[in-house]
Image (cartoon, rainbow, N blue to C red):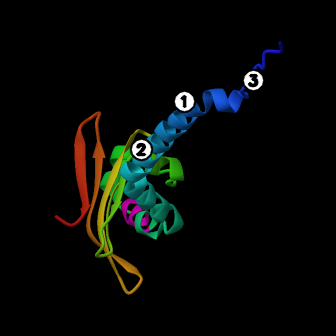
Amino acid sequence: MIDSIDKKSWWQKNRGWVLGLLALISGFFITILVLLGKPIGDFTKAVVDPSVYRNAFEIVQEDQRVIALLGELKPIRVFELLEGEVRYTEKNKAIMTVGIKGSKQKGKLDIVANKSNNTWHYEMIRIRTKKPKKMIEVFGE
């Protein structure tokens, strides 16, 4: 008598837990994309159209109070955007906090601006530092 041995492939033996694990991982990534979709989109928009923070930087660079506090300012790089927060509303309004570095110390550049006719109109531009804790209203409020 010959006994027949039913051999199953690795996939046939393990397909249940592999598919379950893939579903769990997919669910995790979809959740992350849903939660971070808007911030990632806003950050991308700021990188693609940097005029809102670059124009504000030019205004700040001319303010003698800022120069006295921070020193000579270094240009804003993409990494400084990561140190802050970038939000856009549906009504072409930008609300940003961007890291800014000077020769004496670093701080934060707060910006609130509205875009109309492809031009940014600023409601508020402010510089903040931690040590010493100071705030300079460059424009607005």
Give the structural element (helix, strand or loop) at label 2.
loop
Q: Position of residue 99 (x, y in %)?
A: 41, 47
Q: Nearer the viewer, residue 101 or 78?
A: 78
- In the rendered image, is residue 72 in sight? no
Boundaries of the magenta span:
55-61
In percent of the image, x 16 and y 64: which residue is there? 141
The residue tagged 3 is 7
Q: Residues within 10 Å of mark 1 (few under 14, many from 20)?
A: few
Report the residue that reaches farthest toward the top.
1
Q: Nearer the viewer, residue 1 or 38?
A: 1
In percent of the image, x 46 and y 70: which residue is there? 51
Q: CA distance from mark 3 to mark 2?
A: 57 Å
Report the residue that reaches farthest toward the right.
2
Q: Main secondary structure of the magenta part?
A: helix
81 on left or right of 88: right
In the image, which is nearer the foreground, mark 3 or mark 1?
Answer: 3
In the image, which is nearer the foreground, mark 1 or mark 2?
Answer: 1
Amino acid beneath label 3:
Lys
Answer with mark 3 or mark 2, whichever residue precedes in sequence. Answer: 3
Q: Position of residue 113 (x, y in %)?
A: 30, 70
The residue tagged 2 is 83
Residue 109 part of the magenta-drawn span: no
Amino acid beneath label 2:
Glu
Report the residue that reaches farthest toward the front.
1
Quadrant location, the N terminus? top right
Answer with mark 1 or mark 2, whichever residue precedes in sequence. Answer: 1
Q: Nearer the viewer, residue 49 or 139?
A: 49
Q: Which quadrant holds residue 7?
A: top right
